[in-house]
Amino acid sequence: MTDPKPAPLLGRLAVHLKMISMDQLTEAIRAQGRAGEDAKLGEQQVIAKHKAAKTAPAAVPKPAPEADSLFSDEPAVAPPPAAANSAARPAPTSAPAAPAKPRAAAPAPAPLAPAAAAAGPAPVGSVSDFATPGDADRARFEDILRRAIARGASDVHLHEGSTVQIRIAGRLTPDGDAMLELEDAERMVLSILSPEQRETLAVRGELDWCHTFPGIGRFRANLYRAHRGLDGVFRFISAAPPTLDQLGLPARLAKFTTYHQGMVLVTGPSGCGKSSTMAALVNLINEERREHILTIEDPIEYVHASKRCLVNQRSAGNHTRSFARALRAALREDPDVIVIGELRDLETISLALSAAETGHFVLATLHTDNAIRTVNRLVGSFPADQQDQVRTMLSESLRAVISQRLLPRADGRGRVAALETMIVTRAVANLIRENKTFQIHSILQTGASQGMALLDNSIRELVQNGVVKAEDAARYVEDAKAAAAA
């Protein structure tokens, strides 16, 4: 007797989901071999059903009920109402097809266990083609993360068919020479996912969350499907929220935590440290005030234990449907401080402004380059007929804007922050209200005594103090002449 063929994907998937046992799969494969068909086991079932629809009932033997439910090509979820109604209509009549030549009937596979049979058809499109991850895959992944942290990396990139890449001082570098073979990255990351997370990844093709590895640390993670397979990025997050001093940020930023009403924004491009700066500000409020802090994030990065404040953290997409939905609910949850992970859309921006106007202190981030563009972006998010009103709201509720970049240090020991800080004084508020934001630049240029600074001036100071090399600084300044003068 010949050995059965290797288990096909659909069969391995059924075993992985515990719908059948390996013995049952082996018997089904033997039955496939006796049928004399070269098609995969799943394809054999689909072909059989297709033939049955076009020929007399006796042309193709009907599979055993259990096998039919396992390898069904019907969708795993009920179709939307329109599709369901369409499916309920009689099929249009057509000329009968020529009878197909009958083939030998394959013996039915061994019956499924009762629990597996009750589970219904497997959602074939919801799980990827992967080998079952195990403890060895998780251990290998944890070793990669440990090495990256030991080398001072901020991010770890896993890509099928490539070496592991880590980001040190803002630059990607290989972590050794070993290539990730097909499915290596997939097995490693799937070893840490819950069943719900795997299903979300399968349906959406991407996944954002934070994960804590005992004895290693906490990471913000993103998985996404690409042409090579499953890729992932893991960013290290310190176990405890950082302080301003630990981040190398100026002590003057502490002033921005003394507001009890209004809005402070932390802005900059992706990867510039906005989340860390925000966490340091929240931590300072938590240590010095007795208030209710409510955060809305996606995902929750730094976990804040309640100190002097009561801190509640909500994850958009997990604890609540969206930022906007959580913000609407927040106004009924008696918060003093509302922390918004990102102002992503018009509705969220509008609700954040309303919260700042109604006596709450709002901290939020935004993907903008500098303070002036931040104001213009907020106003420009609204329809033209509402923009005058929004300018008035901003002039009254915006308290400060922090725009930052992370530059590589000259000594190679990590990165250092360069900041632009705008405090909304009466003069700045008037320029916002009158739609003259271009004139704010001169106020930032001369407002050092009030705690203001232009980004270019901050970068120039880092170069003059030998903290950053001039050639590195040139990539971040907006004024080329300022870079040359430095």
Image: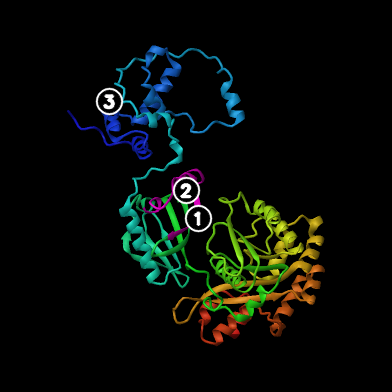
What secondary structure is marked by label 1?
strand
How crowded is the residue under tag 3: few (<14 C-alpha within 10 Å), some, or many (20+)?
many
Image quadrant holding the N terminus, namely top left
Give the distance between the C-alpha atoms of the residues marked 2 and 1, in whole angstroms. 9 Å
Q: Name the residue under label 1.
A: 209
**Residue 483's spot in the image, x, y percent?**
59, 81
Give the Cα separation between the discs numbered 3 and 2.
Answer: 35 Å
How packed mark 1 is, by other alpha carbons closer than 10 Å (few <14, some 14-19, many 20 or more), is some
| Above or below, comparing residue 426 to residue 319 in the picture | below
Residue 31 — which label? 3
Which residue lies most toward the left here?
1
Residue receiving disc 2: 197
In the rendered image, residue 173 lying in the magenta stretch gets the answer: no
- The magenta span reads 188-212
Task: Give coordinates of residue 448: x percent, y percent.
Answer: 69, 84
Residue 146 makes an appearance in the image: yes
Applied colour scheme: rainbow
Q: Are marks 2 and 1 in contact (CB under 8 Å)?
A: yes
In the rendered image of this protein, does residue 448 appear above or below residue 328?
Answer: below
Q: Could you tell me the amino acid type at mark 1? A: Trp
First-in-chain label (2 vs 1): 2
- The reply to whether callout 3 and callout 2 are in contact (CB within 8 Å) is no
Give amino acid for label 2.
Answer: Gln
Q: Which element carries disc 2, helix, strand or loop?
A: helix
Mark 3 belongs to which amino acid?
Ala
Q: Quadrant of residue 404?
A: bottom right
